[in-house]
C-alpha cells in the first residue's frame, strides 16, 4: 500500500495504536496498580490490623466457620494469612450443583482471633481497580473481555510493528533530544518502549492467553466439540485432574487439617503452605490438596494430596505437567507476578508505568506531529484532531485524577453509608467523565496546565485527607514501622509532586510563547520565542 | 504516513477499509484454521496439542495482519489469506473425516 515495508508498518503502528490507545491506557494504568492490589486493599480498610494468628488458630477458625456456612459442600478452600496476597484468612466454598450446573459459591474474610467475618468499611479496594483492567466496569464480563482482547491484539501488532519500523533500535535508544518538540516526544516514546520491551511483549501476549479460550473457541471445539460437557472434558484432560474423587455420599469425619499441614511443612518448611483445597468435605471420599507458596513464575503450585478421612498422604504432585501447559502457566504467572518479592514487585510496577507512559507519549506524538499543519488551516484544527487532543488530555491526566477521586471517596464517604463501595466506583467514573469533557471548555494547552494542577492537588492532599480521617497517617505509620501504609502515602505524595513539576514546566513554556500561537505562526520561521510549548515543529522534523 | 493527504480520495479509503476487514476477519480465520490443523498434526496428547494451537494462534494472527498491510496490491493481500486458509482448511477437514484426527 505504501512505498515500502517499513512505511506500511509505520502506518499500521500509528493508526492501530491511536484507535485503541485510550482503552489501552486505562487497561495499563489500572493493571499496573493491580501489582499493589493487596496493599491498596489494606490502605482502603484502615480499621483492619494485620492478622498475626498462628496457622493452627487460622485452621480451627476456618473449619468451624465452613462447617457453619457450608455443610455438605462440594469444595472448601482455605487461604491462611501466610503471604502477601492473603493478609487476612480467607475461606471459599462451593455447594454441589444440580443437573451439571455449577453450584452456588461464597467467600469470606475471617478474623482469626474472633472467628467472625472481618469488619471494616465497605470498599472496592485494590481488587476493584485491578479487575477493571480486564473486566472494565458496568459491562457484562464477556463483552468486556472481548473489548480488552481486541485492544490487546492491536497492542501486540503495535509492539511488533513498532520494533520493525526501527532501523536503528539501539542507536535510537541512546538518542534523546530534549526541548525539540516533536523529536523529543518521539525520542521519549522510543526510550520508554525499548527500555521495557520484553515486559510490554510479555504482558500483552500473556494477557491474550488469559482469555484465549474465549477468543479462540473454535480450536478447542474442533477437537472436543461444543458445549459445557466438551469444555469440561478438555479442561479435565489439560489440567490432568484424573485423581478427582467422586462423592461417595456416605458421611465421614474430616481428618485433622493441622496434621496434614504439619506433614506439608515438614516437606517444604514453615509458612510454605499457601492454601488448602478440600474436595467433598464430610464425605467418605474427601480429598485435601495442600498447595505450596509460589516462588517462581510458574503459576501452579506443587501440591500434596491427602485422603481427607484417614489423613494419609496419597500423592506428591509437581507443579508442572506437560510442556504446553507449562508454557501457558509460566506466561500467566509472569503476567500476574504473584511470586514477586517486594523489590521485583516495584520493578513490575515501574515497568507497568513505563508501558502506560509509552501509550501516552505515542498518542501525544500523534497530535504533536499533526498540529503544525492543523494550525495553518483556515478554520482551525479539524474536528478529528481536536477530538484526539481532548481525549488525550481527558484520559492521560484525567484517569489518574479519577483514580485519586476513588481514594478520596474511600476516606470521605460516610463509613456506614450502605452503598459506599458502589459509590466509590461511581465517583471514579463521574470524575473521569468530567475530565473528558473539561478540554472542550479550554484552549488545549491551558487545559493541560489546569488538569495537571488538579492531579497534583488530588494526589498531594491524599496523605493529609488520610491523616484527618484516620489515625494511620504518615507520622504514625513511620513511627510504628508500618511500611505498607507509609509507602502508599509516600507514593501518593511523590505522584502529586511529579504532576506539580509537570504543571510548572508546561506553565513556564506557555508563558514564554504568545497567547495564541495559531495566529502568529509563519510557515518556515521557527525560532525559540515563537516555539509552541508542546507542539513545536523543530527544523529537523520530518 | 505523511503521504496520506496526497491520496486521500474515496478509492484510498476503500483500500484501507478492505485491508482492515481482511486483517481483522481474514487474519482471524487463518489463525484459527492454521491452529486447528496444528492441533491435529502435533504428536502429543490431544489436550496439549490443542493448547499449543491456542498459544500460537495469536502469533499467526499477528503475522497475518502484518502481511495484509505490507503487500502492495490488495488482491495479493486477500489471496495471501484465502489460499492458505483453503489449503490448510481442506487438509484439516481431510484429517478429521479420514479419522486420523479426533
Image: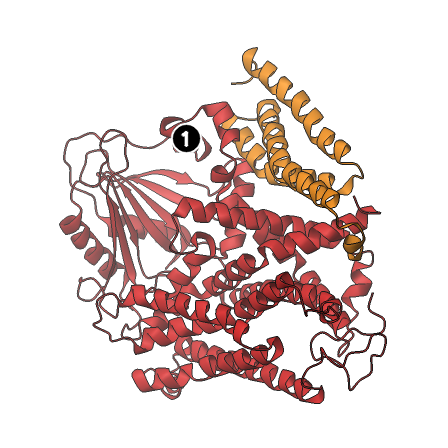
Chain colours: A red, B orange
Residue at 30% from the left image edge and 52% from the top image edge = A262
Residue at 28% from the left image edge and 60% from the top image edge = A89
Residue at 30% from the left image edge and 65% from the top image edge = A421
Task: State left or right for residue A467 relative to residue A450.
Answer: left
Q: Which corner quadrant holds the N terminus of chain A? A: top right
Residue at 22% from the left image edge and 37% from the top image edge = A96
The furthest residue to the front: A378
Q: Image height check: is A362 above or below A294?
A: below
Q: Image height check: is A444 above or below B88?
A: below
Rendered location of residue A26, percent (x, y): 51, 61
The quarter of the displayed image where residue B23 is located:
top right
Front-lying residue, A243 or B19: B19
Chain identity of mark 1: A
Q: Is residue A60 visible?
A: yes
Q: Image height check: is A270 above or below A243?
A: below
Q: Which corner quadrant holds the C terminus of chain A? A: bottom right
Rendered location of residue B4, percent (x, y): 77, 53
Task: State left or right for residue A418 relative to residue A232.
Answer: left
Rendered location of residue A32, percent (x, y): 51, 63
- The local secondary structure at tag 1 comes to helix
Front-lying residue, A181 or A407: A181
Q: Is residue B99 visible?
A: no
Task: State left or right for residue A102 relative to residue A503.
Answer: left
Front-lying residue, B40 or A81: B40
Rendered location of residue A284, percent (x, y): 19, 34
Instruction: Count every numbered label the image shows and give the total.
Output: 1
Task: State left or right for residue A153 relative to residue A264.
Answer: right
The quarter of the displayed image where residue B96 is located:
top right
- Which residue in the structure is indicated by mark 1? A231
Q: Crowding at label 1, few (<14), some or many (≥20) Cα neighbours within 10 Å? A: some
Amino acid at each position: 500500500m505504501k512505498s515500502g515495508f517499513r512505511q506500511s508498518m509505520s502506518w499500521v503502528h500509528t493508526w492501530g495504536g491511536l484507535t485503541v490507545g485510550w482503552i489501552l491506557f486505562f487497561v495499563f494504568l489500572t493493571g499496573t496498580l493491580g501489582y499493589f492490589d493487596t496493599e491498596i486493599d489494606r490502605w482502603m480498610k484502615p480499621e483492619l490490623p494485620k492478622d498475626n494468628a498462628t496457622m493452627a488458630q487460622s485452621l480451627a477458625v476456618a473449619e468451624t466457620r465452613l462447617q457453619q456456612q457450608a455443610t455438605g459442600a462440594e469444595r472448601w478452600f482455605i487461604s491462611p494469612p501466610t503471604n502477601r496476597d492473603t493478609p487476612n484468612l480467607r475461606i471459599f466454598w462451593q455447594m454441589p450443583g444440580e443437573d451439571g450446573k455449577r453450584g452456588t459459591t461464597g467467600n469470606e474474610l475471617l478474623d482469626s482471633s474472633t472467628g467472625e467475618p472481618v469488619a471494616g468499611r465497605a470498599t472496592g479496594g485494590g481488587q476493584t481497580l485491578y479487575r477493571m483492567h480486564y473486566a472494565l466496569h458496568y459491562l457484562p464480563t464477556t463483552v468486556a473481555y472481548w473489548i480488552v482482547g481486541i485492544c490487546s491484539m492491536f497492542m501486540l501488532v503495535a509492539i511488533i510493528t513498532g520494533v520493525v519500523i526501527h532501523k536503528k533500535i539501539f542507536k535510537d535508544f541512546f538518542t534523546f533530544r530534549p526541548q525539540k518538540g516533536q523529536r523529543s516526544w518521539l525520542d521519549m516514546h522510543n526510550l520508554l518502549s525499548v527500555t521495557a520491551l520484553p515486559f510490554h511483549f510479555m504482558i500483552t501476549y500473556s494477557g491474550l492467553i488469559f482469555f484465549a479460550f474465549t477468543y479462540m473457541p473454535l480450536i478447542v471445539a474442533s477437537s472436543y466439540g461444543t458445549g459445557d460437557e466438551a469444555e469440561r472434558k478438555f479442561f479435565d484432560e489439560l489440567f490432568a485432574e484424573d485423581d478427582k474423587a467422586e462423592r461417595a455420599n456416605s458421611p465421614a469425619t474430616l481428618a485433622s487439617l493441622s496434621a496434614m499441614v504439619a506433614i506439608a511443612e515438614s516437606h517444604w518448611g514453615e509458612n510454605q503452605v499457601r492454601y488448602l483445597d478440600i474436595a467433598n468435605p464430610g464425605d467418605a471420599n474427601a480429598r485435601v490438596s495442600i498447595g505450596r507458596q509460589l516462588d517462581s513464575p510458574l503459576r501452579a503450585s506443587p501440591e500434596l494430596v491427602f485422603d481427607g478421612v484417614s489423613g494419609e498422604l496419597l500423592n506428591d504432585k509437581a507443579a508442572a505437567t506437560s510442556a504446553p501447559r507449562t508454557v501457558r502457566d509460566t506466561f500467566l504467572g509472569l503476567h500476574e507476578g504473584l511470586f514477586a518479592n517486594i523489590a521485583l514487585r516495584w520493578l513490575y510496577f515501574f515497568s507497568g508505568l513505563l508501558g502506560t507512559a509509552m501509550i501516552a507519549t505515542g498518542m501525544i506524538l500523534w497530535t504533536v506531529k499533526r498540529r503544525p499543519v492543523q494550525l495553518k488551516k483556515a478554520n482551525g484544527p479539524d474536528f478529528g484532531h481536536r477530538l484526539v487532543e481532548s481525549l488525550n488530555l481527558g484520559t492521560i491526566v484525567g484517569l489518574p485524577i479519577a483514580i485519586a477521586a476513588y481514594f478520596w471517596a474511600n476516606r470521605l464517604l460516610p463509613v456506614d453509608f450502605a452503598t459506599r463501595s458502589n459509590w466509590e466506583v461511581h465517583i471514579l467514573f463521574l470524575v473521569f467523565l468530567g475530565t473528558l469533557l473539561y478540554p472542550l471548555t479550554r484552549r488545549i494547552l491551558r487545559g493541560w496546565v489546569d488538569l495537571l494542577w488538579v492531579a497534583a492537588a488530588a494526589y498531594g492532599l491524599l496523605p493529609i485527607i488520610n491523616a484527618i480521617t484516620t489515625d494511620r497517617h504518615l507520622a504514625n505509620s513511620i513511627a510504628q514501622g508500618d511500611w505498607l501504609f507509609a509507602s502508599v502515602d509516600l507514593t501518593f505524595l511523590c505522584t502529586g509532586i511529579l504532576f506539580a513539576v509537570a504543571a510548572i514546566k508546561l506553565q513556564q513554556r506557555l508563558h514564554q510563547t504568545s497567547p495564541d500561537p495559531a495566529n502568529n505562526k509563519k510557515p518556515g520561521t521557527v525560532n525559540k520565542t515563537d516555539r509552541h510549548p508542546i507542539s513545536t515543529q523543530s527544523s529537523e522534523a520530518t | 504516513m505523511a503521504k496520506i493527504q496526497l491520496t486521500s480520495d474515496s478509492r484510498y479509503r476503500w483500500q484501507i477499509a478492505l485491508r482492515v476487514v481482511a486483517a481483522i476477519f481474514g487474519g482471524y480465520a487463518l489463525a484459527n484454521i492454521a491452529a486447528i490443523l496444528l492441533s491435529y498434526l502435533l504428536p502429543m496428547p490431544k489436550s496439549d496439542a490443542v493448547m499449543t494451537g491456542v498459544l500460537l494462534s495469536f502469533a499467526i494472527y499477528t503475522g497475518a495482519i502484518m502481511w495484509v498491510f505490507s503487500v502492495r496490491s490488495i488482491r495479493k493481500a486477500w489471496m495471501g489469506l484465502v489460499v492458505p486458509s483453503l489449503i490448510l482448511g481442506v487438509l484439516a477437514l481431510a484429517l478429521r473425516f479420514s479419522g486420523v484426527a479426533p
